């Protein structure tokens, strides 16, 4: 009874979790390749620069608590359609720097506090930069980090349930185990001799 129960539910888990997570497994497989060859896609990176002046009262108040952070951020969002979360907002004696980050995207702003002039540099890495950052969970927010964690759990269950199923197929068990350890040896040899 326990053997039949384990085999039945391993098969159920393997089939249905494979179908549920098919797209995410495919996504992480493809982006694993694009990440491994990221240099090939760097030509798609574009850099845009802007200059301008803010309202002086927003930036030159002696009390840094009175700096109009929200007005500054919204100015760049509304004027230049800057996207992403504010990753850094630093106030110095003579300068303010603001950094916006999103997958495949960064915007850096430098504001002169004495005359409220600024320079903005946007770096856009295109579609490949976007999906590569999704793969890494870089600048994606907590919700996407949960997607990555859940995907890793699903892939682990799929792999283990597949291994359990193999152990229940007598005709293919030995060949499967041999191939499993052959794969482990090949990976070890490749890393040991060429991986460093």
Image: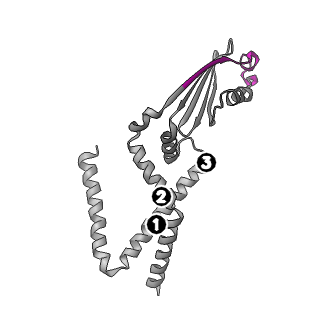
Please give the name of the residue rendered at 31% of the width and 71% of the height, measured from the top-left corner: 176
Which of the 4 image quadrants contains residue 7? bottom left
Q: Rounded to the nearest whole Å, what is the CA distance between mark 1 and mark 3? A: 24 Å
When the figure is inspected, residue 83 is found, relative to residue 182, above or below; the finding is above
Q: Does the magenta stretch include residue 62?
A: yes
Of badges 1 and 2, nearer the viewer stands 2
- Report the residue marked by disc 2: 25
* Residue range corresponding to the magenta coloring: 48-66
Which of the 4 image quadrants contains residue 183? bottom left
User: Is residue 112 among the parts visible in the rendering?
Assistant: no
Q: Identify the mark nearer the N-term, 1 or 2.
A: 2
Mark number, residue 158:
1
User: Is residue 163 among the parts visible in the rendering?
Assistant: yes
Please give the name of the residue rendered at 52% of the width and 70% of the height, measured from the top-left corner: 16
Percent x, y of residue 30: 43, 51
Left or right of 21, for residue 58: right
Q: Residues within 10 Å of mark 2 (few under 14, many from 20)?
A: some
Q: Residues within 10 Å of mark 1 (few under 14, many from 20)?
A: many
Of badges 2 and 3, nearer the viewer stands 2
When the figure is inspected, residue 121 is found, relative to residue 182, above or below; the finding is above
In this view, which residue lies farthest toward the bottom? 1
Mark number, residue 142:
3
When the figure is inspected, residue 115 is found, relative to residue 19, above or below; the finding is above
Of badges 1 and 3, nearer the viewer stands 1
Percent x, y of residue 138: 53, 42
Camera-nearest residue between 22 and 7: 22
């Amino acid at each position: 009874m326990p053997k039949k129960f384990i085999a039945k539910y391993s098969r159920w888990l393997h089939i249905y979790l494979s179908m549920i997570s098919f797209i995410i497994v495919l996504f992480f497989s493809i982006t694993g390749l694009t990440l491994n060859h990221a240099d090939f896609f760097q030509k798609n990176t574009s850099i845009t620069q802007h200059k301008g002046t803010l309202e002086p009262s927003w930036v030159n108040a002696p009390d840094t608590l009175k700096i109009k952070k929200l007005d500054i951020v919204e100015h760049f969002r509304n004027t230049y359609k800057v996207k992403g979360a504010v990753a850094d907002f630093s106030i110095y004696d003579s300068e303010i720097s603001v950094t916006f980050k999103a997958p495949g995207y960064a915007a850096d702003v430098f504001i002169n506090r004495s005359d409220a002039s600024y320079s903005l540099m946007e770096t856009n890495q295109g579609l490949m930069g976007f999906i590569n950052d999704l793969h890494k969970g870089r600048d994606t927010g907590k919700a996407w980090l949960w997607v990555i964690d859940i995907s890793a759990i699903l892939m682990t269950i799929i792999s283990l349930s597949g291994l359990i199923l193999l152990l229940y197929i007598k005709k293919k068990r030995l060949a499967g185990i041999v191939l499993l350890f052959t794969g482990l040896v090949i990976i070890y040899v490749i890393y040991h001799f060429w991986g460093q």
